[in-house]
C-alpha cells in the first residue's frame, strides 16, 4: 500500500489501539445518527491505524481524542448528504458515500466532488487526502 509507506516515512500521530467494542459502538452511534456503517475497508484500516493526524490532516478513528473522533466530527462538521465523514485536510473532505459505495474527495467549501474511488481503492483515497494540500 502506498499509504502505509507514506505513514512509515513521516511522523504521524495515531490514535490508541482500536478495541473491537469501540468500533461496534461507533457503528451503532453513526447508524443512530441516520448515517450508514463505516465501510469495511475503512474499518480494516482502523484496526491498524485508529485515527491519524499530521500537519493539519486528519483521519478519524473510534474513541480517540477530539481531533480525530469519527462520531464527534460527523456530528460537528458539515458534509455532503448520504456520506460519512472520514477525514479532512485544509481544503478537502474525505467522505464515504454510502449510496454509491464510493470514497469521495470533496471541496470543503461547496462539497464539489473532486475525485471518487471505489471501496477497494481505499489506499488511493487515503493517499489523495494527504497529497491534496
Image (spheres, grey):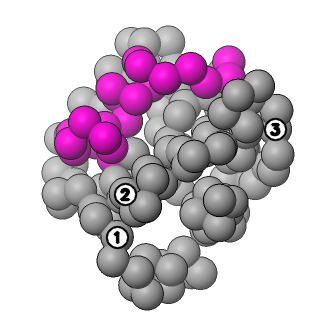
Residue under label 2: 53
**Location of residue 47 in the rendering, given as x and y in whole percent from the top left corner:** 32, 60
Please rate how many residues cluster around mark 2, counting C-alpha atoms within 10 Å: few if below 14, some from 14 to 19, many from 20.
some
Relative to the observer, which residue lies in front, 95 or 108?
108
Secondary structure category for the residue under label 1 = loop
Q: Are marks 1 and 2 in contact (CB under 8 Å)?
A: yes
Q: Quadrant of the N terminus?
A: bottom right
**Residues at marks 1 and 2, CA–CA distance in whole angstroms:** 6 Å
**Location of residue 37 in the rendering, given as x and y in whole percent from the top left corner:** 48, 32
Asked which quadrant contains residue 92, the reply is: top right
Secondary structure category for the residue under label 2 = strand
When the figure is inspected, residue 29 is found, relative to residue 64, above or below; the finding is above
Relative to the observer, which residue lies in front, 85 or 98?
85
Left or right of 126, for residue 81? right
Whether 67 is among the magenta residues is yes
What residue is shown at x 55% (from left), y 49% (from top)? Answer: 89
* Circle nearer the N terminus (3, 1): 1
The residue stretch that appears in magenta: 61-81
What residue is shown at x 28% (from left), y 62% (from top)? Answer: 14
Residue under label 3: 113
Secondary structure category for the residue under label 3 = strand
Left or right of 110, for residue 7? left
* Circle nearer the N terminus (1, 2): 1
Amino acid at each position: 500500500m502506498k499509504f502505509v509507506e507514506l505513514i512509515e516515512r513521516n511522523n504521524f500521530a495515531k490514535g490508541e489501539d482500536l478495541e473491537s467494542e469501540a468500533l461496534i459502538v461507533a457503528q451503532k452511534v453513526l447508524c443512530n445518527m441516520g448515517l450508514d456503517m463505516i465501510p469495511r475497508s475503512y474499518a480494516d484500516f482502523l484496526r491498524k491505524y485508529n485515527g491519524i493526524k499530521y500537519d493539519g490532516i486528519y483521519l478519524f478513528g473510534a474513541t480517540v481524542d477530539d481531533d480525530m473522533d469519527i462520531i464527534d466530527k460527523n456530528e460537528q462538521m458539515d458534509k455532503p448528504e448520504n456520506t460519512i465523514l472520514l477525514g479532512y485536510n485544509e481544503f478537502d473532505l474525505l467522505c464515504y458515500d454510502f449510496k454509491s459505495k464510493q470514497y469521495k474527495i470533496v471541496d470543503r467549501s461547496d462539497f464539489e466532488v473532486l475525485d471518487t474511488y471505489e471501496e477497494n481503492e481505499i489506499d488511493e483515497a487515503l493517499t489523495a487526502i494527504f497529497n491534496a494540500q
